[in-house]
Image (spheres, grey):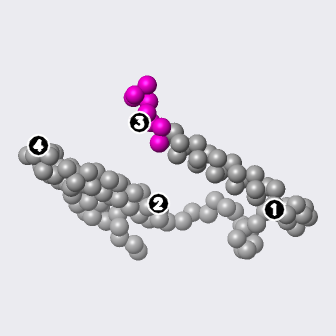
Amino acid sequence: MESFSGYVPILLQLVLAVLFVAVTLFATHLLGPRIVTRKKLKPFESGVKSVGDARQPFAIHYFLTAILFVLFDVEIVFLYPWAINFYELGSMGLISMGLFLLLLLIGFWYIHRRQALQWE
């Protein structure tokens, strides 16, 4: 029973989050307007009339930039715990983080060499 007591705050936070979502959804359903018209049921496309095919090709650079941002942003998640526990990790922590940063720099060098971030 003692090991379960450590999970009580997490369980309480989960219950409160689910209750908040449930109450919010119920309140918006209860308080929201119920006017149903043909114009209201029509799909809304951000105020721009839909013209042509939705499958128009566009530059892959948008996807590539987003993926590379996520890839290089996630490395920060690994750098924070290392920076906080720098003295406790000792020389093995320094070596492993050096290897991690070296692999990261090799990846960045590869991206730069392939000109993946060059916009035309």
- Whole-number angstrom distance, CA of label 1 to CA of label 3: 40 Å
Residue 97 left/right relative to 7 = left
Q: Quadrant of the C terminus?
A: bottom left
Q: Residue at x 14, y 46 (%)?
A: 88
- Whole-number angstrom distance, CA of label 1 to CA of label 2: 37 Å
- Whole-number angstrom distance, CA of label 3 to CA of label 2: 42 Å
Mark 3 or mark 2: whose residue is earlier in sequence: 3
Q: Are dots 1 and 3 in contact, CB under 8 Å? A: no
- Whole-number angstrom distance, CA of label 1 to CA of label 4: 59 Å
Q: Residues within 10 Å of mark 4 (few under 14, many from 20)?
A: few
- Whole-number angstrom distance, CA of label 3 to CA of label 4: 31 Å
Q: Residue at x 44, y 30 (%)?
A: 4
Secondary structure category for the residue under label 3: helix
Mark 3 or mark 4: whose residue is earlier in sequence: 3
Secondary structure category for the residue under label 4: helix
Could you tell me the amino acid type at mark 4?
Answer: Met
Q: Which residue is mark 3?
A: 6
Tell me if residue 111 comes above or below residue 78 in the rendering. Answer: below
Q: Residue at x 11, y 43 (%)?
A: 92
Secondary structure category for the residue under label 2: helix
* 108 vs 59, nearest the viewer: 108
Quadrant position of residue 46:
bottom right
* 89 vs 43, nearest the viewer: 89
Mark 1 or mark 3: whose residue is earlier in sequence: 3
Secondary structure category for the residue under label 1: loop
Residue 63's disc is 2
